[in-house]
Image (cartoon, grey):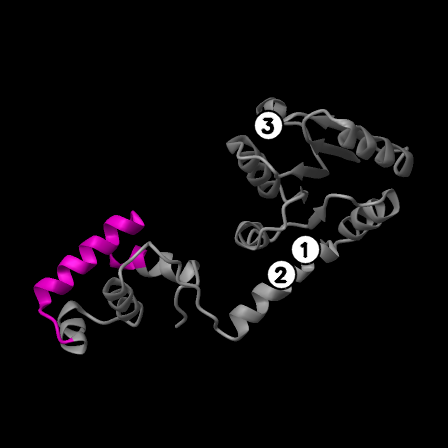
C-alpha cells in the first residue's frame, strides 16, 4: 500500500511520517510538499491513501484531491481550522476522513484504520461542526449574510426560489415589473451568476433559503 502525506516540511509532518512508518512498516509511506502535487499527478503514481493538509489556498491541492477521487482511492483531509463555513464545503465532497491538528499517534492510526476498513472517520472536534450544520439543515435555519443584497433584493430572490415569474413578483411585492427586472439584474450582478436558475441554485447551496 502506498500512503502519501501532502504537507510542507515541518516538525509536525516529520512526526506524522514517523508515526505512520512505525504503524505500517510493510507499507510505503512518504511526504510531498504542495509544490510537488502536480508532479504526483503527472507521473500517474498509484496512491492508495492520500492525506492532505488543506490549510492552504493552493489550487493544486483541490486538483490532487479530485484526481484521487476519480480513481476511487481513499482521501483524508487534515486541518487546524474548525471554521464551519469552510468545513461545510469539504464535508460536502464526501471524503473518507477528516482529521484535526493535535491528534496523538494512536488516535491517528485508529482514524486511518477506520478509513482503510471502508468507514468515514471524522475527528470529534470536527464532528461538532458537522452536527451543528446538520441541525441547521434539519431545522431549516437560513443564513442570509449582511451586505450582499438589499432587503428588497432578498425578497425578490426568495420569490425566485419559489418559482415566481417577474409579473407575479411585482404583484406580490406591490411594485412594477420594471422594478422587479432591475432588482433581478442587480442580484445577478452581485452574485456573479448569468441567469435566474443559477441565482436560485447559488442561493440554495448557500442555504439562504430552503424549498
Magenta span: 174-199
Above/below status of 56 relative to 8: below
Q: Quadrant of the C terminus?
A: bottom left
* Residue depicted at 33% across the width and 54% down the height: 148
- Give me the C-alpha separation between circle 3 and circle 2: 31 Å
Give the side of residue 32 with respect to residue 105, left or right: left
Badge 1 is on which residue?
Answer: 126
Q: Earlier in the sequence, mark 3 or mark 2?
A: 3
Disc 1: CA contacts within 10 A as few (<14), some (14-19) or many (>=20): many
Badge 3 is on which residue?
Answer: 41
**Looking at the picture, how far across and down is residue 167, in whole percent?**
13, 71
Of circles 3 and 1, the one toward us is 1
Disc 2: CA contacts within 10 A as few (<14), some (14-19) or many (>=20): some
**Main SS of the magenta segment?**
helix
- Find the residue positioned furthest to the front: 147
Give the side of residue 2 with respect to residue 209, left or right: right
Q: Quadrant of the N terminus?
A: top right
**Looking at the picture, how far across and down is residue 161, in whole percent?**
31, 68
**Looking at the picture, how far across and down is residue 163, in whole percent?**
26, 71
- Give me the C-alpha separation between circle 1 and circle 2: 6 Å
Mark carried by residue 130: 2
Q: Report helix, strand or loop for mark 3.
A: helix
Above/below status of 207 relative to 28: below
Q: Report helix, strand or loop for mark 2.
A: helix
* Residue depicted at 61% across the width and 27% down the height: 34
Amino acid at each position: 500500500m502506498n500512503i502519501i502525506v501532502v504537507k510542507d516540511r515541518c516538525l509536525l509532518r516529520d512526526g506524522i511520517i514517523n508515526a505512520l512508518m512505525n504503524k505500517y512498516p510493510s507499507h510505503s509511506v512518504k511526504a510531498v510538499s504542495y509544490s510537488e502535487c502536480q508532479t504526483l499527478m503527472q507521473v500517474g503514481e498509484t496512491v492508495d491513501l492520500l492525506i492532505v493538509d488543506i490549510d492552504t489556498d493552493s489550487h493544486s491541492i483541490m486538483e490532487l484531491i479530485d484526481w484521487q477521487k476519480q480513481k476511487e482511492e481513499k482521501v483524508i483531509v487534515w486541518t487546524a481550522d474548525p471554521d464551519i463555513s469552510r468545513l461545510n464545503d469539504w464535508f460536502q465532497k464526501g471524503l473518507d476522513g477528516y482529521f484535526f491538528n493535535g491528534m496523538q499517534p494512536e488516535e491517528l492510526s485508529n482514524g486511518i484504520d477506520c478509513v482503510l476498513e471502508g468507514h468515514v472517520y471524522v475527528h470529534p472536534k470536527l464532528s461538532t461542526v458537522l452536527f451543528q450544520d446538520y441541525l441547521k439543515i434539519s431545522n431549516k435555519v437560513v443564513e442570509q449574510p449582511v451586505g450582499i443584497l438589499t432587503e428588497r433584493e432578498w425578497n425578490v430572490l426568495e420569490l425566485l426560489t419559489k418559482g415566481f415569474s417577474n409579473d407575479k413578483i411585482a404583484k406580490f411585492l406591490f411594485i412594477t415589473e420594471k422594478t422587479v427586472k432591475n432588482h433581478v439584474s442587480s442580484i445577478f450582478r452581485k452574485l456573479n451568476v448569468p441567469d435566474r436558475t443559477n441565482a436560485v441554485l447559488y442561493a440554495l447551496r448557500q442555504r439562504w433559503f430552503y424549498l
